[in-house]
Amino acid sequence: MTAASQTGYDAAREGAALVNLPDRGVLAVTGPTRQKFLHGVLSNEIQGLLPGQGRRAALMDTKGRLLAFMRVLNGQTEVWLEVSGNRIDVVEERLAFYRVAAPVRFQRRPVEVLAVLGPRAGQVLARAGCDVLALEPEGHLAGAVGGQPVLVARAGDMPAQGYVLHAESPAAAAAAAALESAGAVPLDRETLDVLRIEDGRPWYGPDVNDETLLHETGLVREYHSPTKGCYVGQEVIARLEARGGNVSRALRGLRLSARVEAGAPVMSDEKEVGRVTTAGVSPRLGPIAMGYVHRTRFEAGTRVEVGGAAATVAGLPFQAAARAEPKP
């Protein structure tokens, strides 16, 4: 890890760090039945959200495969969908398909998405002009950062106690500069990935795709409502819940004896039992990764090989304990 990466990591764990999320886009949904429409399509409770409240949700196909992860933010006259993993085209197309005669409309917002991470993120935002300390999880408010209009939301999908900001493209750079002046340290993507691995935060794109089931990610409780009625993919979720959530593979952490790259196979007894999705080197834990591991090998403490080197399966999130080297 470079000196700049270490500085960004320390800021995210002890202060505040700033990162741009260029793979995220925002779709505004309007119309008198916008909440009812989204409630019938997405995996989580949307109908009861009040203005200023938000929730994370998944868009699935009828076979329960994940098409997108999003943050749903309810405003006075619009619902904003913050879509990750460059999936906004897919979301807009699929929602238009389900719309039929529903009086709802979709429009992309010309915004960039920034994230401020760390235990002092709220204080940095306040110094930059936006008091967010009273926000509930996924709650949001309109404010100003460095004099630039922004929408700020508490973000449970972020590592290190994060917030996201939506700022129109001309204002985003000025807002980022104001946040740096207020104490946020720039964070690179490689270090962001290390933080995500440590905190067990899989994202659409690197860790989730359109072949993944929600139960495989370990995020069912975060993206799904057990009391909700019908939505697209609900039958698959209900069937898996009735079977105790048993799936043939699941996302797990991996303690490594040497650094590997994403895509590296997880091996046991000369058979492939999984694949790495995100990997990095943690200043606290050394080489680590997360990836999908077959159910016969996904118990914590199971010894495997990754990239030809010894590794140990671990739960997510990783504990902050001292690094424990896997033994051959």
Image (cartoon, rainbow, N blue to C red):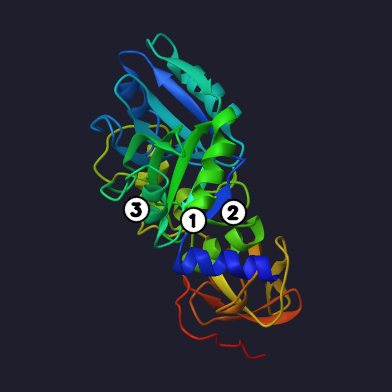
Labels 2 and 1 touching (C-beta < 8 A) = yes
Instruction: Name the residue beneath numbered marker 2.
Output: 207
Label 2 to label 1: alpha-carbon separation: 8 Å
Q: Position of residue 91 (x, y in %)?
A: 53, 29
Q: Which mark is residue 217?
A: 1
Where the N terminus falls, by quadrant? bottom right
Q: Label 3 amino acid?
A: Arg
Label 1 to label 3: alpha-carbon separation: 11 Å
**Which residue is at the far bottom?**
327
- Name the foreground residue: 296 vs 305: 305
- Name the foreground residue: 179 vs 254: 179
Q: Label 2 amino acid?
A: Asp
* Residue 294 appearing in the image: no
Where the C terminus falls, by quadrant? bottom right
Q: Position of residue 123 (x, y in %)?
A: 37, 55
Indicate which disc, 2 or 1, sits on the residue closer to the N terminus: 2
In what element is the residue under mark 3? helix
The local crowd at label 3, few if under 14, some if 14 to 19, many if 20 or more residues have their Cα within 10 Å, is few
Label 2 to label 3: alpha-carbon separation: 18 Å
Q: Label 1 amino acid?
A: Thr
When the figure is inspected, residue 86 is found, relative to residue 118, above or below; the finding is above
Instruction: Name the residue beneath numbered marker 3.
Output: 221
Q: Is residue 161 left or right of residue 170?
A: left
